Amino acid sequence: MPLRHKPTKKGEPLLPLLEIRDVTKRFGGLVALDAVSLDVNEGEILGLIGPNGAGKTTLFNCATGFYRPDLGQIRFEDESLLGLSPHQICLKGIVRTFQIVKAFHTMTVLDSVATGAFARTNNMEQARKKATSALELVGLSDKKRVPIKSLNIVDRKRLGLGCALATEPKLMLLDEVAAGLNPVEIDQVTGLLRRIRDLELTLLVVEHVMKLIMPVADKIVVLHHGKKIAEGKPSDVARDEAVIEAYLGRE
Amino acid sequence: MSYLSSRLGRKIEAKYRPAGESMTDVQLMIQVVVSSLLLGGIYALVAAGFNLIYGVMDVINCAQADMMMVAMYVTYWSFALGGVHPLLTLAINIPLFFAVGVLVQKYVIDRLLGAPLFIQAVATIGLGYVIQNLALLFWKEDYRMIMIPYTESVLRVADLHISLPRLVSFVGSLVVVASLYAFLTKTDLGVAIRATSENRDASSLMGIDVRQVYALVFGIGVACAGVAGVFTSTFYYAYPMVGTAFLLKMFVVVVVGGCGNLLASVAGGITIGLAEGVGAFVLGASWKEAIYQAVFLIVLALKPEGIFGSSR
Amino acid sequence: MAGLLVAAIIPIVLTPFLLHVAIMVGLFAYVGSAWNLGCGYTGKLSWGHSAFMGLGAYASTMLYIAYRITPWLGALVGTLVAAGFGMVVGAICFRLGLKGHYFVIATIALAEIVRVSFINWADLGGAWGLLMPVVRDSLYDFQFHSTRIPYYYIIFAMLLGLLYLKWRITNSKLGYYFTAIKDDEEMAESLGIDTFKYKVIAMMISAALTAFGGTFYAQYVMYISPDTVMSVHVSTDILMGPVVGGMGTLLGPLLGSAIVQPIMELTRAYVGRRGLDYVVAGSLTVAVALMRPSGVIGWFEKPFEAIFASSSQTHKEG
């Protein structure tokens, strides 16, 4: 599946694909994000974790144009994303999935994914082709003509991923993709994520389920009460005292 | 440029100026303001009934104004056939329309609960069409007006001439809306109703018979239209299509005041009444209908929830 | 295909009255389908389409009366004017993010403003309207009086053209995007769809097509006025077909009009006094809304699918 990809010359310092700098977002009196900074490098899988209400989805919404940060800067490939609408951001190469899986409920599987593919082509045949390869990737090829209403939850999540992949993104933001899945299904999704990463896509994954994210992530960032409290390799973060307290302390 | 110098201005002046007296521009303007403000009371009442139904049941009753039209005819025929003074018809209309409302709710509206908004609108518009055209069928298109001393009487306050029926209607409408408000906030039944509007399932679990509440609410809403009809027929003529004109205004009043909000109906009604009257005065009667639509669009652009609304 | 053949031959055997009914069915099927294209597919339901119809009617009629320009060209101007107004309506309603009943009432408001403006526009006939000058049967002047059969074929052709256009759009990027917007606007945005742009486009296309129907109406009835062609009543008439037949489907408006219009015309003819036609139509609409809100077409889906290529939402292989 052709993906747009800027080749980097050896020896040049890599600019992060996505730079989030001191982003603050308030809702009335509530500070959802407090000067959060993080970088996502090309080709890596970054896991964003934290207790409920830590601000993970808010950060997502800021990065994808659904919210506008009150303060701070968000840059993608060295271009500012602030003020762009969600569809413009998608066309630049960032796509997201939704925590509560959304779907075009009157369409079939193939049609939904084709809708995503139309972001890169105007041609019906081409869109169908791209959709078909995206479906192969996520393992839904045999369910092309099925109406969405009859899909189970794992397949719906695959579908969400398929739609997102069809837009040929450089960066994918996944919002709690493991929610509601049993261990077997989680393994399937983990494999899927690895396959996606092998295609040289960059992933920013918000996750609650450690079993999914710890083995796969290159880097972990932990948010708590809207602030970043830890960052680093999964094994290091797992041992970080502040992180343990954040999770345990919330009981 | 004085609008009085135009032909149109003179015509309007002739309408508002009592015979044999001259008025200053300011007085004329005040006259217009007062006159149209009073009309706003009726708008408020019709809108209140609508808002009650919408607020509690989440149902859009597009037939509200047509029910008012029927009420006007009931008042007219009571007078024409039985010599009953219009205001006395209130005693007939209130229970009658309440009963009608309950019946309509049980057989028609009940099935619309939870239906998509457009379908509700279509169904109630269809209902309105049926009512309107039945009226057309039975009573033809002629304008019917009640002409008795009461409907022609005028009150003199300072230098202003205030039509008595308009004043009574205005006060009456406000009284009704105020009592409704008091009913909803102070009585047990009223509280039950409000609870149902907040959370249908929770109320049902607490023993409130939601079906009955809905029937009651719809009945009250339609009764409001019934009362409004009585008042309106004292200074306006009845004809089958009068519902449509009021319906469009009612929508605007509801949105401008704030959806689902009872007291906001008053604010909306008065605003639109004023806009209509003053606008007609300044631009000419034939622009009347465009004016309040324009006001509506402006309010929508600036404060979509309406003057007193909360986002719903 | 059999249905098409029947429809093609039938005017020859119909009485003038039934021919009129057939033409009315065709007209409302046409404007209903045009409305459906803008509204049924995107889920944004306008109740102000009479403005577009009226703008089309007035544009072509004015150009004909003033300059004897053939209404066919005048219709083109009408579609441009209507598309322009459609852009205004779309820009206002969608920019303000109006949803649900706010949107519906706003479309009514805008249509009413147009209607009242035309009432006050003395040069365009004001409240009295415009009377079409009568000439002998002529394609150029778009008038036929010795027989009305040409009108039938014209509206028939228009309807076929529109249905073909709808079918093409449904199976194209535009159609997919419209459906996506209706199903889940947020998700559509996240997949790169400029929902504002496409909603406005839908409104403009719908407006332009409706305007052409307005011109046809003007040429058929030979008289237009703001109240007969731009009022809320007309808007309601326009959407009754799709609502009864099935919104968002290809043939729904056609079916709906084929049910509603004959009923209304027949009641008008046999009862004489005004009113019963809408009592029946109103009751029918209420019944459909209560019992089968997705439209009557649901009952016919299987046989229809056998006859025509695609009559439902699921996209087949192109």
Image (cartoon, coloured by chain):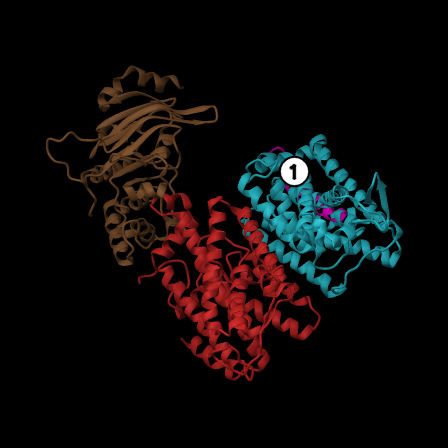
How would you classify the magenta stretch by its main secondary structure?
helix
Chain displayed in red: C
State left or right for residue B174 relative to residue A21.
right
Residue drawn where x is 47% and y is 75% of the image = C154
Q: Does residue C150 appear in this view?
A: yes
For label 1, count other residues whose C-alpha is less than 10 Å away and answer few (under 14), some (14-19) or many (20+).
many
Residue found 25% across the figure and 52% down from its top? A132
Looking at the picture, which amino acid does disc 1 mark? Ala
Position of residue C76 in the picture relative to residue B97 (left or right): left
Location of the C terminus of chain A (image quadrant): top left
Q: Which chain is cyan?
A: B
The chain painted brown is A
> What residue sits right under mark 1 in the picture?
B264
What subunit carries mark 1? B
Q: Please state the horizontal and vertical placement of residue C143, each as a whole percent of the image.
A: 53, 78
Q: Position of residue A60 (x, y in %)?
A: 35, 33
Q: Which residues are magenta?
A: B205-227
Q: Is residue B289 magenta?
A: no
Give the secondary structure at mark 1. Answer: helix
